[in-house]
């Protein structure tokens, strides 16, 4: 992919100077344009995006600084370099107030102009990075929201708000998939650290001998293969947040070093002697029962209390099933792939019958699979769940319909449950489900119609 060329506009009534400057600055990365009057200048600005402009203060039909509002109205990011043969403090102030990026006094060497253009190009790149960072921050704030309407979720939102505007360590506990990473990001991106780095490391994903090097960095020659010095995550997260995910899996020997950093805000790289200082807010998350790990001497008690200045425990989804409806609406926004997808009537009730061992992460995966596998704008994610949800549903329905004690399940009910189970095992695929239960595709479709089992899969 070719990088887009930058447009430079030279505005000066000295035609020889314009030609000389254009020839000197011509390159593969830059397109040069020339104007000799204010009118020509604004005409070019209306047709192309001018990135950098060399603007003479004295033009036949206007003064240079008076053009700035019009130039910037076409492209607010245009870097204007003023040039004048009558340098004075008053003119410099006028230029800066009008929006000048730089100010050159005539006569000037073309090397000086080139240097000013180089600085302007560098500034444009830095502004682009800043704009992207701001976009990412806004996106992170919008996406990393812990969803729920129950009273316990309301309490968690209050703790997130308190943690966001403090630099104290935070300990987030909860089952796998319950949203610990989302809460950590919500704390970072909604508080005072939102424009600073957010770095995450999974303590269970790295071998024991690599975690220390990743966290604290190392000096050249610290161990075999350390051919160059490397910064650790604490250095890279300076001024921001470091998420230590699955802290319960951190080796006990390394826990002591982490405790020292939390107490003194200081550490050393592997193989180093220099004492480095870290201004980093630590968020730790774990699905491990740390109190049990302390009793088994797998986790330091002093580190547990040091990390838990602010403690946030996330309940499993099975304990807040009333939030499933609002979670589905929220998650479908990011999983619907541009389609206007809704959930079929009665589906929320079916989803609430399931215990969700994988918590919110499993719910998101099921919705995403349903969007991919099922056609149309109405999905039935419950057919992709384990058959246990339908077994439970069938028992509940049977119990509701049972007129007297001891009544047996009918053959139709057994067949219906068997077909539903086959759909679950084969992700809602008609052909595979039919083969699994030993009937033809046409028979399966007839049975689906008989039992009013609507499914959008093929």
Image: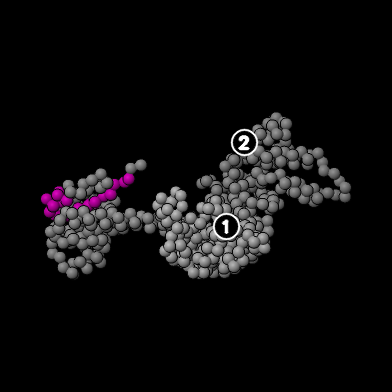
Q: Secondary structure at mark 2?
A: loop
In this view of the protein, which residue sits in the foreground, 241 or 454?
241
In the rendered structure, the answer to whether residue 418 lies left or right of residue 301 reads: right
> Would you say residue 222 is visible in this rendering?
yes
Residue on which the image places disc 1: 250
| Residue 160 point in image, percent of width and height | 55, 65
Residue 300, above or below 451: below
Residue at 61% of width from left, 47% of height from top? 366
Residue on which the image places disc 2: 458
> Would you say residue 194 is visible in this rendering?
no
| Residue 428 point in image, percent of width and height | 65, 39
Quadrant that contains the N terminus: top left
Q: Which residues are magenta?
A: 3-21
Q: CA distance from mark 2 to mark 1?
A: 46 Å
202 in magenta: no
In this view of the protein, which residue sits in the foreground, 22 or 214?
214
| Residue 285 point in image, percent of width and height | 57, 60
4 in magenta: yes
């Amino acid at each position: 992919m070719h990088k887009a060329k930058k447009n430079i506009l030279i505005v000066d009534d000295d035609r020889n100077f314009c030609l000389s400057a254009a020839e000197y600055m011509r390159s593969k990365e830059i397109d040069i344009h020339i104007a000799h009057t204010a009118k020509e200048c604004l005409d070019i600005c209306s047709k192309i995006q001018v990135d950098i402009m060399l603007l003479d203060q004295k033009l036949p039909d206007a003064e240079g600084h008076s053009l700035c509002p019009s130039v910037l109205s076409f492209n607010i990011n245009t870097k204007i370099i003023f040039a004048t043969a009558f340098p004075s403090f008053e003119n410099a102030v006028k230029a800066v107030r009008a929006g000048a990026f730089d100010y050159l006094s005539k006569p000037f060497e073309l090397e000086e102009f080139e240097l000013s253009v180089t600085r302007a190009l560098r500034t444009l790149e830095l502004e682009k990075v800043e704009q992207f960072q701001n976009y990412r921050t806004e996106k992170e704030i919008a996406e990393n929201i812990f969803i729920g309407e129950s009273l316990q979720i309301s309490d968690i939102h209050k703790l997130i708000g308190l943690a966001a505007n403090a630099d104290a360590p935070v300990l987030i506990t909860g089952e796998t998939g319950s949203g610990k990473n989302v809460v950590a990001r919500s704390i970072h991106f909604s508080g005072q650290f939102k424009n600073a780095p957010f770095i995450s490391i999974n303590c269970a994903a790295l071998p024991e001998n690599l975690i220390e090097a990743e966290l604290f960095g190392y000096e050249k020659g610290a161990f075999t293969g350390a051919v160059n010095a490397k910064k650790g995550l604490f250095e890279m997260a300076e001024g921001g947040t470091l998420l230590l995910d699955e802290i319960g899996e951190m080796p006990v020997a390394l826990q002591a070093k982490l405790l020292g950093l939390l107490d003194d805000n200081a550490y050393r790289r592997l193989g180093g002697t220099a004492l480095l200082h870290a201004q980093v807010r630590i968020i730790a998350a774990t699905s491990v029962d740390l109190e049990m790990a302390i009793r088994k001497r797998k986790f330091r008690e002093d580190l547990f209390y040091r990390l838990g200045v602010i403690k946030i425990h996330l309940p499993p989804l099975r304990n807040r099933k009333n939030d499933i409806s609002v979670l589905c609406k929220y998650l479908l926004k990011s999983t619907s792939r541009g389609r206007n997808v809704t959930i079929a009537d009665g589906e929320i009730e079916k989803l609430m019958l399931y215990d969700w061992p994988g918590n919110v992460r499993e719910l998101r995966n099921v919705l995403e699979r349903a969007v991919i596998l099922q056609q149309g704008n109405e999905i039935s994610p419950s057919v992709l769940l384990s058959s246990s949800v339908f077994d439970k549903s069938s028992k509940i329905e049977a119990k509701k319909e049972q007129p007297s004690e001891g009544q047996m399940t009918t053959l139709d009910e057994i067949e219906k449950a068997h077909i539903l189970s086959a759909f679950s095992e084969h992700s809602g695929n008609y052909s595979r489900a039919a083969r699994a239960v030993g009937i033809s595709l046409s028979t399966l479709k007839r049975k689906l119609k008989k039992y009013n089992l609507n499914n959008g899969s093929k």
